Amino acid sequence: MSTTNTTKPFDIAVVGGGIAGLCLTIGLLKHNIPVTLYESAAAFGEIGAGVALGTNAVNAMESIGPDVKAAFEKVATFNQWESKNNIWFDYRRGVGHGAHSGADKDAGMGELIYSVKTPRPSAYVHRARFLDELVKLVPDNIAKFGKRLMDSETLADGSVKLKFKDGTEAVHSAAIGCDGIKSCLRQVVLGESDPAAHAVFSGKYAYRGLIPMDQAAELLGDELARNSQMYLGYHGHVLTFPVEKGKTMNVVAFASKPSWDDPSWVVTTTKEDLRADFEGWSSHVHSIITLMQKTDIWALFNHLPAKTYVRDRIAIIGDAAHATTPHQGSGAGMAIEDAYVLAEILGGVKSADQIHAAFKAFEEVRIERTHNLVTTSRACGQLYDFELKGVEDDVEKIAEDLRTRMLWIWNEDLQKEVADAKAIFEKTSKL
């Protein structure tokens, strides 16, 4: 929290009004930093459906402020059985033991492989509902809509000029890109020719859906419908978890593809294609598929590691910095961590001349952790799809991997990160 009521003698432009941008804006305002939030859409809004938020994400929200934590709690949904409160996912076989060979192909379908436990109750939110609550914490005069960033320029005094598609321009002491996986500011920071400037296809795509819980429970039974499940199989997996206080079951069904040639990352397909992708899977998976109404598929892209998150007084966070696949359910959580850590560092800045040093301190404490998320998440998708080298469809090895896979993400000491970053900043800035 801010230690002074004095408004800072510099201002920050936050580009992008998703979860990262809103959490960062809220954090900056708590430190009395003048901020303007630029959103390309005509109003705040989120695509996608449900998102899982782990212990680290909840800790970050709590650290930004009790109002952010309260906004989360207002829309958070937990596993509906009390005995499943601390279960991240129950991992199950989505295919039989002999599915690949054809022999005894139904054996073991749906059987439990491993239950991953969380340090605190596992939580899920509907993205749009969470965003609605965060928006309420931002004063009306902060956000400007219809502002799609096209380019930026560093001026002679170090300030940043933003150039928008509508022909308008704005000058700020610094700019922070929260503008997602297709970030304009990522390209500015890295340079258009950098191979990491643009996202790459991960080899996976996903069907997403929301199913009324009563229908899901009728087909699957209460345990499987009302608590988080993950069904693993060859070159695909299906996950479900409750959202909207248990009224709805969120579904994401993943499949594999060697390349993605369509310029659009979201394309419409057919129910037949969906069924074909999961032919030979368990009755549980087929029951889920029969209830899915939309058959759009979402290509899953991620970033290659960026050599830096900072250029002059421009920084990038969240998906703009380290867009990841969703296989460890931690993309949004890492973005919220970024927002907390960066706001805390900027809270100690006394003049615009120190902003670059603050950004570099942020980068130093965050870049390895966030790069690791992208790498391990991609490997995790291979684990779920029986593709991880040395593990494949050996469920005992899968269980052993799952036993520790998420711990480094959930158990992070964010306060230590902030303390380390502040120490770096004090050494490198002109205090």
Image (tube, helix red, strand yellow):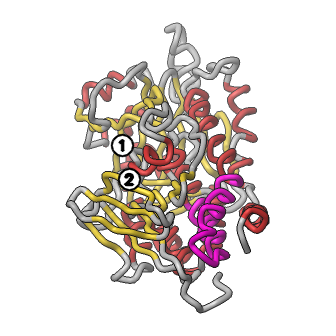
Q: Quadrant of the C terminus?
A: bottom right
> Mark 1: which secondary structure?
strand
In the image, is residue 424 part of the stretch drawn in magenta? Answer: no
Check if mark 1's residue and mark 2's residue have beta carbons within 8 Å.
yes
Q: Residue at x 24, y 65 (%)?
A: 168
Indicate the position of residue 333 as horizontal and vertical percent values.
Answer: 57, 56
Residue name at image x 38 percent, y 53 percent: 49
- Percent coordinates x, y for residue 315 in the rendering: 53, 56
What x and y, as percent, mark residue 42? 23, 65
Q: Which residue is mark 2?
A: 49
Q: Residues within 10 Å of mark 1 (few under 14, many from 20)?
A: many
Q: Is residue 353 left or right of residue 156?
A: right
Q: Where is the N terminus found, in terms of image quarters?
A: bottom right
The residue at 55%/32% (across/down) is: 381
Which residue ends up furthest to the bottom in the rendered image? 5
Residue that protrudes farthest toward the left in the picture: 166
- In-front residue for pair 35/86: 35
Which of these two is toward me, 215 or 184?
184
Amino acid carrying label 1: it is: Arg
**Crowd class of label 2 (few under 14; some 14 to 19; many from 20; radius 10 Å):** some
Question: Would you say residue 355 sits in the magenta stretch?
Answer: yes
The amino acid type found where label 2 is placed reads Ala
Estimate the x, y position of residue 391 in percent, counting from the top left.
Answer: 68, 21
Q: Which residues are magenta?
A: 336-365
Q: Secondary structure at mark 2?
A: loop
Give the Cα separation between the discs numbered 1 and 2.
7 Å
Taking 150 as reference, is 395 above or below it? above
The answer to whether residue 123 is seen in the rendering is: yes
Q: For the stretch drawn in magenta, what is the main secondary structure? A: helix
Query: On the image, numbered disc 1 is attached to which residue?
Result: 208
Q: Earlier in the sequence, mark 1 or mark 2?
A: 2
